[in-house]
Structure formats: C-alpha cells, structure tokens
Image: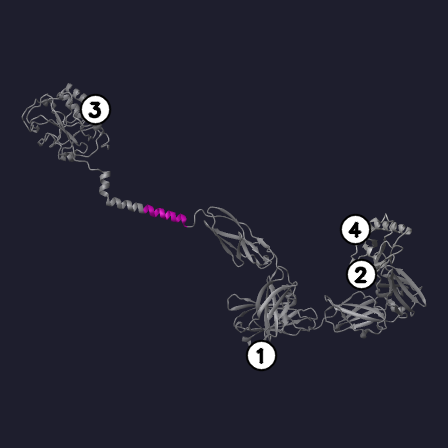
C-alpha cells in the first residue's frame, strides 16, 4: 500500500519544494539520509523566519501514519526532534507539519510542511573463506588465477554490494570488480613460480566498506595439479596379504616435487583406509599395501601435492584401481549353529546343523569337515572316537536361511542324549580353525533368558532381555517362512538390533539362546513384525444354520497373508477376539436368507472375507420328529382309550349298534287287552302259534271270505314269502302284505323259525265265542299294542294308503274262486290261519249276544324289502 502511494508522495514533495522556493518556514534535517536497517534514526524539524507557530504546534508523520508523541523530543520553542526505528527495505517519507494550518497547505502556499525520503539498506559484511587456485592444463600450470569467497550478511535491494578482487605481484596491483562471489585474474604469459603474491577482496556499498584477510604466499602455493597418472595394482601369489601399486608424476619434477597419499577399501565397504603420510612423504612412484585379507577385492586411489608439508592444494583422487588378493589359509572358524524341531515321536529331536562361512575365509571354501561326538562312543582310554564327514561346498551352498548357508547336516537325537559337533572349513590353501557346539540332554539344558522384549523402532527390530550371569555369549535367532538366521552377542549384552535384512509385513519368530562354554541353553521366543500392514485377505467362512441361530466357523488367515497381528474379528458389528475361530449368530428369523462375512483387523487396516450365504431352517432340529412322535403317541393314546371304552361299555355299544328285537312269540299281546282280557288258546298244530294272519277289509262291514271257503292249507311251521316283513299293524283298516311261511319241516317255536316275520300288534274280535261260526255282521275289533319300543315302520305311518290297498285286495278276494284264490295267495306268499272254534273267545259279561260276522283281520303287514327301517 505504501509502495503504491510513493509516486503521489513524490509529486507532493516536489510541489512543496517548489512552494518552499517562494517561502517555507519548516526545515527537516538531515536531508535524504541512507539508513541501516535495524537501527534508529533521529530527525529534527526547525521553524524559521516566522512567529506564527511554535514547536508545540508541530507533529510528525511517517508515510500516512502519525508518529506517536512519545517519540518526540522538544529542543526549544522552534525545534522539535523525532526518533523512529528503521524497519523494512522500502523507502518511506517522513513529514513535519503544523497542527493549525496543516489542513490549509495549499492555501498557505506550503509554508508549514516539510518532508524527507528515507532510503534503507544493509551495510557490507566482511567476505569469508577467500581461496585462489591455478590448475594444471595439460603438462603446464595455467596463468589464470581463479579466486572464490563467501559473501556474508544481507544484500541491499536498492544499493547492492560491489566486490573487488585485488592481486599485488611485483609491486603491480591488479583489480577485478564484480557483484558475485568469484573472479579470475591473469598473472601473465607464464605462471610466475617462486613469485610472492598478495591477494584480498573488498566489499563496498553506500553504507560502508569491508575487506577480507590478505593472502600472502608464493605463486606455487596456489597451484593444484592433476592426480597421478597411470595408477595400477598388482598381486603376487606368494604374498596373499599384499598388493603392489605403481603410478606416474602429473608434471615433471623440474617444476615441482610432490608428496603422495594412498587410500584403499575392500569391495562393498563403506569407509576408506588411509596410508599414513609418513610412509609416502618421499617422492616415489610405487608402494606396497600390506596386512590385507586374502581372496579379497580391493579398490585403490592415489593423489598428490607439493612436497612441503601443508603447502599447496591436494590434487583430486585418481580413478579406481581394483585388484583381488590371492587365496590364503582360513584364519577364522565357521559360524556353527543348530536348529531343532520335534522328531517323529515325542522322545526324539530332529537336529539340523548349519554354518556360515568364516569371516576371514581367505579363499573359496571347497569343503567342510564335520565331526560328531556321541557320549555312547567314548573309547576305553577316555578319548572320543570322531567321525569325519566331508561336505562338498558346492553341494552345500544354497539359500537355506535368510542369509547364505554354506553347510547343512541333519541327525536324529533322543531327548536323553547329548552330542558335540565340530566343523572346519577347507579351501585350496588350508583348513580353518575348529568351531564346535554341545547339545545337552533336554533335561540338562540351562534355563532361558528372562524378560524378553522385541520392538520395532527406526526401521529395525530391537531385542532386549535380562542378562544371565553364567552366559558367555548369546545367540539371537530369527526365523520366518521356514528360513532362519542368527547373530552372536557378547555375554554382557542386554539390548541389540537385528543386523540381518528384514522384510516388511513378515512375521518373525525371534529367539534368544544363552550359551555357556559352547553349551546351548533353552530359548526364549517372541513373534514380531518389522512393520505391520492390513491383511491381504479375510477369513473364509462356513457355517451350520439352525432355525433361530447359526454357528459360523472360519479358519485363521495363513501367516504369509496376515501382514500383522490380528487384533479382532468383526461380524455384523460384533467384535470377536483374535483367537476365536467360531461364533454363534443369535436371534435370527426362521426360513430367512442371510449374507454374512468376517472382517479381520490389524492395527493398520482390515480385510473382509468371502461372503457366506445361508438360509435358516423352517423348523428347529428335532421339531419335526417331536411333532411326529407327539402325534403318534396321541393317536396311540386315542386308540387305547377307544379300546378301553369299547371294553368297559360293550353292552351300551351293543345296544346302540345291534339293538335287541323283541320276540313276538313271547309277547303278551294275545292274552291281554286293556278293555277285553282274553284267554289264550293253544293253537293247533297246523297253525302258527298265537298268530292269526288275515287280510280283510274292515271298513266294508262284509266278510272277506267264509269259513268253509277260506281255510288255506299251510305247511307245518313253514312260511313262504317273497320278502321278509316285520311291519306293525297300525290300524284295523290296513291291508296285509304278502306273507311267507317257512318251508322248514322241523317244527319248533315260531320265534326260532321266523326270523323275518315278527308280530308287533294283533286285532282281537270283541264279539265272538268259541265254537260259533262267525256271521257276516260287522264285528267290532280291538287293537292291541305291543310293548316293543321298536320305531314305527313306514307302513304304520302311511296307514291311509295301506287301508286303500287292503280294500282293493279284499274286493278281489271275494270275487275270486276260493280254490284259485288260495293257490294264488300261496304263490304270492299271503299266509292265512283260520281261527278254530275252540280259539274263539267269549265276552266277559255274556249279557248280550251279538250277531257274528266274518272274522276281522288279525294283523296287517306291509312288505319290507330291506329289513327293518329305523324311524
């Protein structure tokens, strides 16, 4: 905002200056100052040639901001000073104004305002680290002297710092100006060897000037030559621990004498080894490196400078010269270890002996000598009998563990046995020192370390444990995916980092073994990850659904797919512990389809398993069987109950389903009448006992037949009938149905021989006497009801129809010839039994005799086709 108003302020200042040329009563000093940023600045405003205003009427304004009165200093009645801090690099205007007339500047021709512009910046700082060098070009030293320095402090924007390179040679001074941090100066046509030079740099701007330290040296002090040329390295079979180095001088020694420096390292090393300068102080062109490792590739470099100590610049290092030392006898023993797993049975151990190459193998290991010592093979003289087993190195090489294992041997060992195993490595030159370990009986192994902790920090696995007093060393082992590696630590170690190359998202089993006098103790083990990630897959789910619940079962995610420790499983927002492999889903609906999956989580993420779809059962297990069994038992109970009821109520059931039919032969209807008690006569042999069956029309008042013409021959105890009838005569006017008399000649009671004809009622004449021939007069008939409770038949209910049919029959009977009539009735099964004279009854009073008429019909029946009909 201030920068945008600077042009306006500048125009106003010019205007005020023009007005001041006419008359101005205020002056600010100093004029146009250059200020150092970070300090304080004091300006004074003086009133001249007027008494209209005083110092009390003045105030200060910085750009558009009024300066607080606390920063004012009143010098006298006509002078007022102000002190302000200098901040920022942008220029600013500082004004002195009068309070009363300041608003009328233009009206008063600018007599009471004056301003100055403040320019700000940084003073120069002394440059540092001035250095000059003259480099080699081909076989000569260049005459161009190149100098560099380091500017220090801030550079001002509005007035930059100017640097001047000064070189004084043979009383002549050369100057090169630049605003950068380097400059070059020519020293003549040839390089001035043995000539004294004085060199310095001067930094200057509007706020001041600064100089560097002066360099006062001979010209050859500033020379930097090329590296030694033709560097070469040689090896000698007789000296497997040394290499010979040769090189050439960069320029002829007539100009300069050199000293050299040599450094070397074996292949793969991170640091260099330097040959002491004392050994190379002389001007030489060859050197022998000693105390090297046999069968090792070395890299060698050489550089040079002037022979005077501390004089001049070192040249750059030469290019790499590489050479391998010859093979030598192994100087260190193999790193022997064992890996134990359970055998086929619980009493044996499967032991794998593994070894790494010696650190100082001094050549390619071609074979190993393995010596296994068993206590059972101890000789009589106390010495052990050793079995030497050569192992071909080429066959043993392979990636057994996380690192290359050079040797592998397997044996089977009982838990109550101990062995000692020794191994030596062999190369083309000799045999290494012997490495051995002792496997004790399982019951004799020393105790394991305590308080084992494994943690991941800074991209490494750190192992901590509590030290054991008896342990001479510790072996830290880590294994994953069937591979193993180990490292050894001293007995006083309590904390170490695994030095092997570990992979992310891989579960390692870290074990620490205490070792005392080559005797290995029991391990303490923990699982750990260098870095954890989300699982690569979720668990596969299977289940056993029921009606209202389902049991889910899943397998643990394979170790190689977990990428971390499983913290929990999640099913339908339900958290299940990490060790669980099953879960029961409760409160489900029957006969319903569900989709479910299991989510496995680690501390960094999760993965969902495959979806398992199931449908709950419609019935719970055993429910259908329970229903069937319950129904079966209920049915059986009902059957048993029905059988018991039938057994105990058999008489009632018999009376309801098979009712007792009264025997007409045992009825008292023939001997009893409510008004006319009659005497029962024994019937003759040629008639049915106690029954007279007649077919007459009682309504005509005429006899349907005469006694001498109506007697029909009947077979003894036999009825001929077309149908069985057991109708009840309900009226004296009913017509008799066709009757049948049994054809049986065996005789007997009527109740035994007439199963289909039963008498339910009889009609007894009221006026008749025994021995008298009935006349044709009308005779009053008495109807006697049977005691049977059998329901009435259709013939009894339809008595009018029966009466009409009986009249027609009687009329037909009177008009026909008796002989023909009897024959036709026999064919139609109409049976009649004429009353004998001795069966006629007399009236009990006998006071008055009545005319006899033809006998009224005793009974009338309606034919029944289907037996008895219930009403």
Q: Residues within 10 Å of mark 4 (few under 14, many from 20)?
A: few
| Disc nearest the viewer among 1 and 2 | 2
State left or right for residue 140 relative to residue 833.
right
Picture layout, residue 36 above or below residue 683:
below
- x 80%, y 61%: residue: 38
The colouring scheme, among rainbow, by chain, secondary structure or one colour, is one colour
Q: Is residue 356 in view from this perspective? A: yes
Report the Cα–Cα distance between label 1 and label 4.
Answer: 101 Å
Answer whether labels 4 and 2 touch (C-beta < 8 Å). Answer: no
Tell me which label, 1 or 4, sits earlier in the chain.
Answer: 4
Q: Which mark is residue 383?
A: 1
Give the CA distance from mark 1 to mark 3: 145 Å
Residue depicted at x 23% and y 41%: 652
Nearest to the observer: residue 124 or residue 784: 124
- The image position of residue 548, as x and y in percent, is 46, 50
Residue in view at x 47 percent, y 47 percent? 589
Q: Quadrant of residue 307?
A: bottom right
Tell me where residue 603 appears, x and y as whole percent: 59, 58
Image-quadrant location for residue 242:
bottom right
Give the labeled residue for mark 2. Answer: 38
* Residue assigned mark 4: 1
* Mark 1 or mark 3: whose residue is earlier in sequence: 1
Mark nearer the N terminus (1 vs 2): 2
**In front: 552, or 349?**
552
Residue 84 in percent (x, y) is at: 80, 59
């Amino acid at each position: 905002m201030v920068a945008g108003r600077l042009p306006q302020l500048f125009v106003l200042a010019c205007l005020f200056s023009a007005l001041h040329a006419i008359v101005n009563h205020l002056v600010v000093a100093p004029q146009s100052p250059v200020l150092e940023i970070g300090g304080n600045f004091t300006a004074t405003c003086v009133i001249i040639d007027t008494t209209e205003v005083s110092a009390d009427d003045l105030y200060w304004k910085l750009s558009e901001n009024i300066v607080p009165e606390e920063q004012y200093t009143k010098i006298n009645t006509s002078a007022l000073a102000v002190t302000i801090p200098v901040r920022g690099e942008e220029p600013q205007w500082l004004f002195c104004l009068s309070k009363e007339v300041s608003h009328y500047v233009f009206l008063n021709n600018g007599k009471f305002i004056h301003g100055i512009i403040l320019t700000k910046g940084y003073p120069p700082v002394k440059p540092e680290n001035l250095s000059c060098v003259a480099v080699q070009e081909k076989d000569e030293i260049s005459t161009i002297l190149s100098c560099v320095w380091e500017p220090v402090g801030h550079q001002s924007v509005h007035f930059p710092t100017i640097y001047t390179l000064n070189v004084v040679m043979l009383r002549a001074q050369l100057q090169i100006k630049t605003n950068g941090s380097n400059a070059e100066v020519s020293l003549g046509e040839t390089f001035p060897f043995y000539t004294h030079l004085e060199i310095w740099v001067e930094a200057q701007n509007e706020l001041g000037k600064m100089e560097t330290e002066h360099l006062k040296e001979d010209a050859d002090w500033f020379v930097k030559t090329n590296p030694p040329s033709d560097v070469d390295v040689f090896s000698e079979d007789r000296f497997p621990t040394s290499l010979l180095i040769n090189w050439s001088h960069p320029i002829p020694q007539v100009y300069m004498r050199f000293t050299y420096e040599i450094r070397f390292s074996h292949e793969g090393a991170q640091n260099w080894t330097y040959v002491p300068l004392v050994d190379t102080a002389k001007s030489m062109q060859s050197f022998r490196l000693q105390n090297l490792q046999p069968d090792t590739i070395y890299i060698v470099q050489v550089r040079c400078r002037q022979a005077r100590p501390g004089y001049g610049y070192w040249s750059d290092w030469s290019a790499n010269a590489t050479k391998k030392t010859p093979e030598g006898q192994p100087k260190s023993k193999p790193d022997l270890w064992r890996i134990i797993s359970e055998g086929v049975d619980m009493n044996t151990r499967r032991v794998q002996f593994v070894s790494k190459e010696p650190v100082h193998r001094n050549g390619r290991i071609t074979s190993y000598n393995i010596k296994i010592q068993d206590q059972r093979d101890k000789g009589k003289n106390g010495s052990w009998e050793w079995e030497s087993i050569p192992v071909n190195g080429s066959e043993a090489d392979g990636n057994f563990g996380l690192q290359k294992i050079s040797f592998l041997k397997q044996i089977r060992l009982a838990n109550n046995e101990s062995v000692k195993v020794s191994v030596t490595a062999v190369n083309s030159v000799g045999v290494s020192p012997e490495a051995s370990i002792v496997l004790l009986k399982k019951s004799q192994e020393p105790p394991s370390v305590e308080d084992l902790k494994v943690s991941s920090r800074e991209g490494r696995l750190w192992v901590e444990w509590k030290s054991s007093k008896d342990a001479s060393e510790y072996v830290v082992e880590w294994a994953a995916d069937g591979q193993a590696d180990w490292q050894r630590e001293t007995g006083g170690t309590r904390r170490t980092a695994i030095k092997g190359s570990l992979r992310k998202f891989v579960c390692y089993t870290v074990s620490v073994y205490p070792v005392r006098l080559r005797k290995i103790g029991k391990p303490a083990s923990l699982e750990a990850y260098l870095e954890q990630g989300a699982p690569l897959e979720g668990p596969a789910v299977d289940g056993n659904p029921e009606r209202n619940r389902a049991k889910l079962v899943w397998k643990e995610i394979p170790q190689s797919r977990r990428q971390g420790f499983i913290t929990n499983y999640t099913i339908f927002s339900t958290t299940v512990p990490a060790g669980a492999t099953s879960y029961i889903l409760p409160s489900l609906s029957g006969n319903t389809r569900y989709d479910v999956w299991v989510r496995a989580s680690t501390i960094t993420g999760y993965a969902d398993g495959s979806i398992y779809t199931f449908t709950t059962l419609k019935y719970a297990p055993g429910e259908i069987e329970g229903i069937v069994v319950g129904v079966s038992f209920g049915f059986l109970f009902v059957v048993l109950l029905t059988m018991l009821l039938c057994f105990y109520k058999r008489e009632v059931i018999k009376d309801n389903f098979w009712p007792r039919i009264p025997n007409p032969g045992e009825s008292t209807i023939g001997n009893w009448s409510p008004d006319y008690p009659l005497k029962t006569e024994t019937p003759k042999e040629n008639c049915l006992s106690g029954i007279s069956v007649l077919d007459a029309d009682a309504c005509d008042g005429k006899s349907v037949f005469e006694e001498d013409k109506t007697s029909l021959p009947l077979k003894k105890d036999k009825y001929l009938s077309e149908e069985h009838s057991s109708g009840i005569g309900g009226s004296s006017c009913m017509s008799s149905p066709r009757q049948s008399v049994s054809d049986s000649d065996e005789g007997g009671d009527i109740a035994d021989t007439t199963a289909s004809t039963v008498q339910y009622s009889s009609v007894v004449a009221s006026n008749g006497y025994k021995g008298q021939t009935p006349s044709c007069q009308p005779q009053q008939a008495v109807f006697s009801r049977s005691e049977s409770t059998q329901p009435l038949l259709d013939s009894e209910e339809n008595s009018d129809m029966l009466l009409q049919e009986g009249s027609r029959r009687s009329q037909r009977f009177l008009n026909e010839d008796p002989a023909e009539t009897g024959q036709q009735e026999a064919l139609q099964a109409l049976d009649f039994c004429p009353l004998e004279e001795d069966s006629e009854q007399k009236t009990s009073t006998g006071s008055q005799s009545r005319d006899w008429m033809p006998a009224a019909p005793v009974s009338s029946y309606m034919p029944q086709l289907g037996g008895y009909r219930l009403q």
